[in-house]
Image (spheres, rainbow, N blue to C red):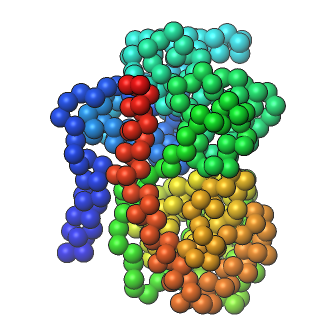
Amino acid sequence: MEEKNRQNELNNNKNVLTAQKSPKYAGKLAFYIGSLEKGGAERVFVNLAEYFQNKGYQIIMVTQYRKEEEYELAEGIRRILSDIPPEETTASRLLNFYRRVKRLHRIWKEEEPDLALSCVGKNNFMAIVTTMFTKTKPVVSVVGEAGEEYPNRLMKFLANLLFPFASGVILQTERSRSFFSERVSKTAVILPNSLNPLFLRERYRGEREKRIVSVGRLDANKNHEMMFQAFAGLADKYPEYTLTVYGEGELRETLQERIASLGLEKRIFLPGVIPDVADKIEKASLFLLTSYSEGISNALIEAMALGLPVIATDVPSGGTQELIRQEENGLIIPAGDAKALEKAMDRLLSDREYAERLGEQAHKIQERLAPDSVNRQWQEYFEKIIIP
């Protein structure tokens, strides 16, 4: 019976995206991204693509690569690879770049989407350049910390040079406007990411598992070593608690070695990427985000939507402060400050009533970032561009 109820809940959540499906053809959209490898930006693109498909749009997903572990596309969404095939690759990087530009330009010419949404660094440059002299209107989005996506003077110069030629510019936080020139920032819009429908559920109200959890790629930016250090500082005080980090990445071996050096192999776990994150973390006692930089973290949004007490680092983009009101629906600590993290963890683990109050307030983010309302904002913005 419990499994049947959960399936009904998931079906109802999906109906949020499929309700009021348009009976007529509404246009053609392209989504352009490096791959569909499991990550925050990729998940946003897949969810948006499905939403617009259910509104009657024809959708193509254009990716440069195909990875092993990827999100699945809904039936009816076509996928096109934009990278040049191996037989056309040469020793000349300049010639390969020219062929990639030519191939992507040909895709826009042949497919004729009304609008192409791109994201992440150089992809935005490629979208603007290759849609020139086509009917396709490029919309670029900066989903992470702008300074990370455009980390040097040349990249920042190119962003400020090319973005004014885009039909639209989407940022995630008000603070990110200051990175760009006035010409770019004054025309850019702030659009939030919608909540993944799988995380739309009632808050778990039973006894919480003695587990601390985190979700994110195993890379240097996520700073899991700080998380491990803070946990180690509290390990003796809270001997029944474990720490689990869901995700995969290039630092797996390094992090496993760090766990071993702390003698916590039986307390800290790295199970990799899993398909049912919401089910795995909804009963946990605490969620951690320790990144040096983020745009607006989808993992943090999802943990809050489940009603978990959360601790997150203050990132340069302002993304964490867009989501958390300090000591009302979560705790914000300085990035890189292991002692502050240890103190915040101790506070929530020792005062479960306070932690529960934070979780109750965090759960309300479901209302603010509900898919039906947020995706409608994206739709209205796209349609203003397609039909001025």
Could you say where residue 270 lies in the image, as x and y percent from the top left? 59, 64
Residue 210 in picture, x, y percent from top left: 54, 83
- Looking at the image, residue 62 lies above or below residue 328: above
User: Can you give x and y, in whole percent of width and height, for residue 116 in the image?
Assistant: 46, 26
Residue 87 placement, left or right of 313: left
Q: Nearer the viewer, residue 102 or 37?
A: 102
Q: Quadrant of residue 358?
A: bottom right
Question: Which corner quadrant holds the C terminus?
Answer: top left
Q: Which image quarter is the N terminus in?
A: bottom left
Q: Is any part of residue 109 visible from this angle?
A: yes
Viewer can see residue 84: no
Q: Position of residue 233 (x, y in %)?
A: 75, 81
Q: Residue at point 22% right, 37% down?
A: 22
Q: Is residue 363 above or below residue 294?
A: below
Q: On the image, which quarter does residue 129 sit in?
A: top right
The structure residue drawn at horizontal position 67% and vertical position 69%, both measured from the top left corner, is 332
* Furthest residue in direction right, as rendered: 153
Horizontally, residue 25 falls left or right of residue 341, namely left
Q: How many marks?
A: 0
Residue depicted at x 43% and y 41%: 378
Q: Nearer the viewer, residue 273 or 366?
A: 366
Residue at 34% x, 51% y is 372
